[in-house]
Image (cartoon, grey):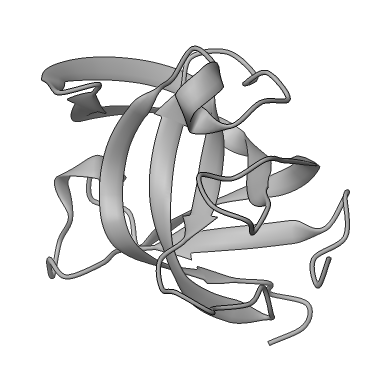
Amino acid sequence: MAIDVGGRVSILGGYDFEPAWLAGRVSVAGTVLTWIPGQNETPACVLRLDEPLTAEGDVRGKRAVLTGSHVVLELRYVDQLWGDTGTVHVELCSVEPANASWQEREVGAWIESHATYECPERV
């Protein structure tokens, strides 16, 4: 993977100028814990956030407010590869997600469809 386990990642907003899920922050940051199967062929990145995040999102078709210290990042575009920066979906999880694809595990809340991720020490 282009991002090593133990590496640092920052997540910034998407389309909205001030996304509600960031609660007034410019970004949130965390440490890469592991890689798990993604929804497609590309693995998803699991981060442990530096601080818990509370946000509203979609949980299998229903809106819910969730607080968690873990996020799953899934690449946004077909043929996109993990690199030093890119566009991702953000799934907020109340617990560390299982090593399984979204379709086969307890899911969190999808809180952003076009977030930007950056690896601060590499950008």
Could you say where residue 55 lies in the image, as x and y percent from the top left?
Answer: 26, 30
**Residue 16 location, quadrant:** bottom left
Which of these two is toward me, 24 or 17? 17
Q: How many marks?
A: 0
Residue 115 sits in quarter: bottom left
- 122 to the left or right of 58: right
Tell me: residue 16, above or below residue 84: above
Decide if residue 52 is in sight here. Answer: no
Give the residue displayed 65% in from the left and 60% down from the top. 9
Residue 25 appears at what percent x and percent y?
32, 53
- Rendered residue at 66%/48% (across/down): 45
Foreground pick, 100 / 29: 100
Residue 96 seen anywhere in this rendered image of the structure: yes
- Residue in the picture at 44% in, 62% down: 88
Residue 117 % position (x, y): 52, 68
Q: Where is the C terminus found, in terms of image quarters?
A: bottom right
Left/right of residue 84 with respect to residue 122 in the rendered view: left
Q: Is residue 38 above or below residue 70?
A: below
Q: Toward the viewer: 78 or 23?
A: 78
Point out the residue furthest to the bottom here: 123
Quadrant in which the N terminus appears: bottom right
Residue at 66 percent across and 40 percent down: it is 46
Where is residue 96? Give x, y as percent.
Answer: 65, 19
